[in-house]
Amino acid sequence: MYALLAICLSLCPQVKLVEETVNSQLREKYGEKMARMQRYDDEAFAIYDELFSYACPKFITPSAPSFEEPLVNYNQDAYRLQLKLFLYEVKQQQLLSGVRTFLKVYSTISLGKLANYMEVDEATLRSILLTYKHKTHAVDSDGKIISNADVDFYIDDDMIHVVESKSVKRYGDYFLRQIVKLEGVITDMDRVKLE
């Protein structure tokens, strides 16, 4: 599960939705790989492939086996198809990662300037921005559309205005865990008999 969570957080960084203990265990186990997955180079795709292959559910083909060709083994076809589709989605995220990087730097930027930085024309940039909006929004349980991105934006008269969401830190959980650890240490110290 941690491998799948590492994939999810590398593709769509979330700070506010992951509990602190889960996040610290995840960073301890997959922190280095998550940092390399953010680069979107060949090494990153190999890591996505490795983690997905390790942690993905075992896919089955919904069709009956072909008894006319008994020597042909189709049991890996569903897995290969899912891996291919997943890696295709990861490649699509490469452009979105570039958009996110630029949006984190600027509070307002013109469409033309961002298009020049990304080396695309303005029509393509608008398409990329719409894709970013589509991929970072979801429908909650009440049917409302909410953003799950750490950076949000809106376009007004060919100007992109960036609204960065700040995560609310939960200090109470942290202090409660530290109190429990301290009580455990005190209990261990009480068990030790002083001579």
Image (tube, rainbow, N blue to C red):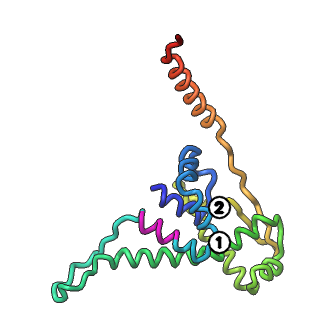
Q: Nearer the viewer, residue 186 or 98?
A: 186
How far across and down, in percent of the image, does residue 60 sit?
30, 71
Q: Is residue 51 magenta?
A: yes
How far across and down, in percent of the image, does residue 66 sit?
20, 84
Query: Residue farthest to the top?
Result: 195
How far across and down, in percent of the image, does residue 48 sit?
51, 69
Quadrant assignment, res 95:
bottom right
Quarter of the image with the N terminus in it: bottom left
Give SS at disc 2: loop
Label 1 neighbourhood size at 10 Å, few (<14), some (14-19), many (20+)? some
Q: Which residue is mark 1?
A: 132
Q: Which residue is mark 2?
A: 149
Q: Nearer the viewer, residue 179 or 109?
A: 179
Quadrant assignment, res 83:
bottom left
Q: Which residue is depicted at the point 42% across and 65% down?
A: 54
Q: Nearer the viewer, residue 46 or 57?
A: 46
Label 2 neighbourhood size at 10 Å, few (<14), some (14-19), many (20+)? some
Q: Disc number at residue 192? A: none
Amino acid beneath label 1:
Tyr
Magenta span = 47-54
